[in-house]
Image (cartoon, grey):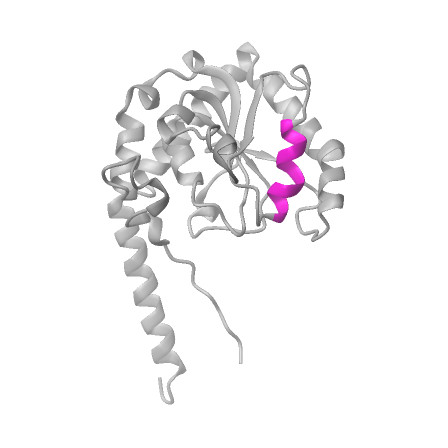
Amino acid sequence: RTQAEIPVPDFTFHSYGKLSGREPDTSWAAISRRLRQGAEGRQAWRLRQRRLTFRGTVSGSRMRRALVPNLMACAPNETAVPLDVQDTSGGARKRAYRLNLTEQCRSRYLLHLEGNAYSASLKYKLACGSLVLLIDTSFEEFYYPALQAHKTHVPIRLSKIWSKNEDLIARDFRATLLPDLRKKLAYYESAEGGAAAARIAAAGQRFAAEQLGPGAISCYWYAVLRHSLLLQHAQRPGG
């Protein structure tokens, strides 16, 4: 018997406990609206801080354990813009490196890296209007197939994405990921690339507003439930 899984929107669309205490309403609709309409979300891409930002916990994530320390160890001149990468897991010292979503929106570039499975933070980064650099991921949310490389975000290559060996992933950082990251940041910091970066960042923000808005999510749920019922009916004798 074959088995199929249907991806659906996760709990963060309703509320996100990790943001409680920092946000009065943690629903995706409320937070995405604040990110888009706030001063940072409306700021021209070129006027944002010239840096690549990542914040996230490393513990428990094979990919982050292999890559985040290497990113943090990069020399200031290894990429076209400073890398503002921090592991926020652990004690008070590391928690001090945390940035709220609004503060992250002030960066020109936001890096996205999978966690223990998919990371729910991608949609918030897209809503910022910063240029999102998405490192190859082996986990996807339901909307990932609708994203368009170089139109809604910029992909960053990682050839050892399926490896369970953290040492191999770490070595791949120098061989594949860092050269790709360096090349793309240099291009987007140029006059020609800067115009392209602004267009992609704006398109990513529109994607978050239109394709992940309440109306679009309701339509997706309708399609999921309708097709689920059709499949169940087809599997019945005489269906």
Front residue of 147 and 101: 101
Q: Quadrant of residue 235?
A: bottom left
Q: Position of residue 124 (x, y in %)?
A: 38, 36
Task: Residue at 71%, 46% (x, y): give it.
Answer: 166
Q: Is residue 220 rendered to the left or right of residue 156?
A: left
Task: Residue at 41%, 33% (x, y): give it.
Answer: 126
Q: Is residue 210 rendered to the left or right of residue 159?
A: left
Task: Residue at 36%, 77% (x, y): give it.
Answer: 232
Front residue of 155 and 82: 82
Please provide the residue range marked out in magenta: 62-72
Q: Position of residue 31 (x, y in %)?
A: 29, 36
Q: Position of residue 136 (x, y in %)?
A: 60, 42
Can residue 157 be seen in the rendering of this structure? no
Q: Quadrant of residue 167?
A: top right
Q: Quadrant of residue 158?
A: top right
Majority SS type along the magenta span: helix
Residue 236's place in the image compared with 12, above or below, is below
Q: Position of residue 47 (x, y in %)?
A: 41, 12
Query: From this viewpoint, which residue is outermost toward the bottom?
Result: 237
Residue 65 among those drawn in magenta: yes
Image quarter where the C terminus lies is bottom left
Can residue 56 be seen in the rendering of this structure? yes
Front residue of 60 and 232: 60
Task: Residue at 60%, 41% (x, y): give it.
Answer: 64
Residue 78's place in the image compared with 17, above or below, is above
Residue 191 among those drawn in magenta: no
